Each structure stands twice: as structure tokens, then as C-alpha cells.
Image (tube, helix red, strand yellow):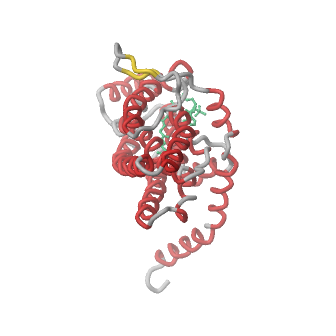
Amino acid sequence: DLEALEQAFQQRIDGGEKIEPQDWMPEAYRRTLQRQMAQHAHSEYVGMLPEGAWITRAPSLSRKCILLAKVQDEAGHAQYLYSALESLGLSREQAYGQLLAGEAKYLNIFNYPALSWADVGMIGWLTDGAAIVNQVPLSRCSYGPYARAMVRICQEESFHHRQGFDLVRRLAEGTPAQRRMAQDALNRWWWPTVMVFGPPDEDSVHSQRSMRWGVKLYSNDTLRQKFVDQTVPQVLHLGLTVPDPDLRFNPDTGHYEIGRIDWDEFNRVIRGQGLCNRERIASRRRSWDEGAWVREAAACHAVKLAAGPQG
Ligand code: ACO
């Protein structure tokens, strides 16, 4: 019966076994994964936009090559995740349709504009730094296809993180105007990045169940703290300032304590009222429409191939 199946399922998870697509799973486990993985895939896909806008304006050929490679990587991450989602019975068309219809969530951070070249550095250093903290544990999550997709994604994110740090370091070591540009970008990206880890544990509706199922390995606040502890020393090393007057190091706990997070802003942004929400979805819709001829040509080619050499 269902209860026995659910117990056996939980035992497999507690024993560290991976759940594979052909295995029995509770409907709610499937739906939780579909929700989280779809949001994750959309985040990668929308995440190409703020940086993509800087490809034509990169200040040197090598920075342009790095940025091109990075933005392409993000598209690849979305592809792995949409493929992993198919293994749960959610087709690409369905998942992507939800994004284009404006019904799906994706990370808050991608609804902020990239106003200067320093913002490109902040996205790599801070946002991808946060993504690594969140995603390394996901490579040990209970669903096999999701966990395996994370391995390569995390390796690529490490490169993104380093190039972002390197870009910001060059600005921080540059002219006073360059340092000001870096500090201004840090001021704008710090808090939205701290919010990336999701609402505080007491308000995180999904955490408890997702942690029991091994879909999440650590709580939102635990990962946020890890990010803060590893990033504040980097900010200080660069001679920049964290835009948080309440930030302090607690020698008793060995952790940095941060000021109040503006959760009203977070909720506004994830409900669709951020600075760029409309523009992001409009841009994805435009790409979908403009790419119709590629999809048609690929479908035609597939029919010809299937018909054989005479077809
Ligand atoms: N941006 C937008 N929405 C968010 C965010 C965020 N940063 N954090 C939480 N939310 C949403 C959740 O999706 C959920 O909404 P829903 O019920 O409509 O689905 C709601 O806020 C409540 O949050 P939680 O209960 O804490 O949700 P959950 O347990 O799913 O945890 C988290 C949120 C940590 C983001 C989790 O889903 C996760 O780890 N996702 C995968 C990581 C990811 O998406 N990475 C993208 C990287 S993109 C890049 O690197 C370019």
C-alpha cells in the first residue's frame, strides 16, 4: 500500500541511495523537484540576459571571449536542467511555456539591471559565488539526474566566479574612478545576492519537507551564512566596503552577523514587480518568436533524416 511504499522510499533516501527516473516516488516529491528544477532552469536561462547585454561593450578582446563563454555556459546549464526535468515527466515545452507565460519563478537577482561594466564582475563574483554555495550541496541531492547535472554546472560556475573576482580586482586596483565604479556596483548587488538563498528558515515553506527528502541538504539561512562568511573577507581584501553598517564579526561564534534584510523588496521582486521583470520575460518571448524558423528547420531536417538517404 501507499504508506509502505512511502516508508521504503524514505528509507532509501535516509540510506543515501539516489532516486532514478524509473523508480517509484511520491507524487509530492516529483512535484517538489519539478518546481525547484524548473525555477533553477529558468534562472540559468534568464540569467544570460543582464551579462549578455555587455558582450558588445566588453573593454577588451579577452574579456569579450570570457564573457561569451560564460553566457554560453549559462545556456548549457539551462539545457541540462530542462533535460533532467523531462525525466520527471515535464516536457521542455511545458516548462518553458510557464516561463514565457510569466507564471514561473526564477531567481530574484536577475531582475536587477547591469548598469556598468563592474556589474558584470559582481554577477560573476557575487551571484555565481552564491550559486556555487547553493549548488555544491545539490550535487549530492537525492534525485540522480539533478545531482549529476550539478557536477559539471558547479565546475563551470567556479570559472565564472574566478573571472568575476578577477574583473573586480582589476577595477579595485585601478584608478579612483574604477574603484568608485566597483564600489557602486557592489552597493547595488550585495543585498539582492544575500537574498538569493531564499526567505529566512522560519518563512521557508518548502525547506522542511525538501530536507527530509534530500532535495535540499542545508537550510536557506545556513547557506546564506556560509556565503557571507566566505565573501566578506574577499571584499575586505579588495579594499572595498560591504554596504551594511550593522555588519560585524562575532569572535565567539566565528561568524559575520549582517544587518536586516529587506524582505519586502525580495517579495516585490519575486512577485514580478522588480526593476526588470517585464523586460526579462519580454526578451525571452522575443527570442522564442524569432527562433521559430530554427525550430521549424530542425524539425524538417529530422523528418528528412528519418526518411533515409532517398527521403
Ligand atoms: N528568487 C526567487 N524566488 C525565490 C528565491 C529567490 N532567490 N528564493 C526562494 N524563492 C521562492 C521559492 O521558489 C518559493 O516559491 P514557490 O512556493 O512559488 O515555488 C518561495 O520563495 C518560498 O521559498 P522556500 O520555501 O525557501 O523555497 P525552496 O525550498 O524552493 O528554496 C531555493 C529556495 C533555495 C532557491 C531552492 O529552490 C534552490 O536551491 N533552488 C535551486 C538553486 C537555483 O535556482 N540556482 C540558480 C542558479 S542561477 C545561476 O547561477 C546563474
Point 64% across, 31% down: residue: 267
- In the figure, is residue 124 to the left or right of 140? right
Tell me how many marks there are: 0
Single out the residue that lies furthest toward the front. 176
Foreground residue among 162 and 177: 177
Residue 148 picture location, percent across and down = 35, 45
In the rendered structure, the answer to whether residue 156 lies left or right of residue 48 reads left
Percent position of residue 78, x then y:
48, 52
151 shown above or below 302: above
Report the side of 117 relative to 73 (left or right): right
- Relative height, residue 110 to residue 304 (above, below): above
Residue farthest top in this picture: 252
Q: Nearer the viewer, residue 134 or 255?
A: 255
Residue at the image point whose x is 45% and y is 59% from the top: 67
The residue furthest bottom is 310
Q: Residue at x 54, y 40 (%)?
A: 189
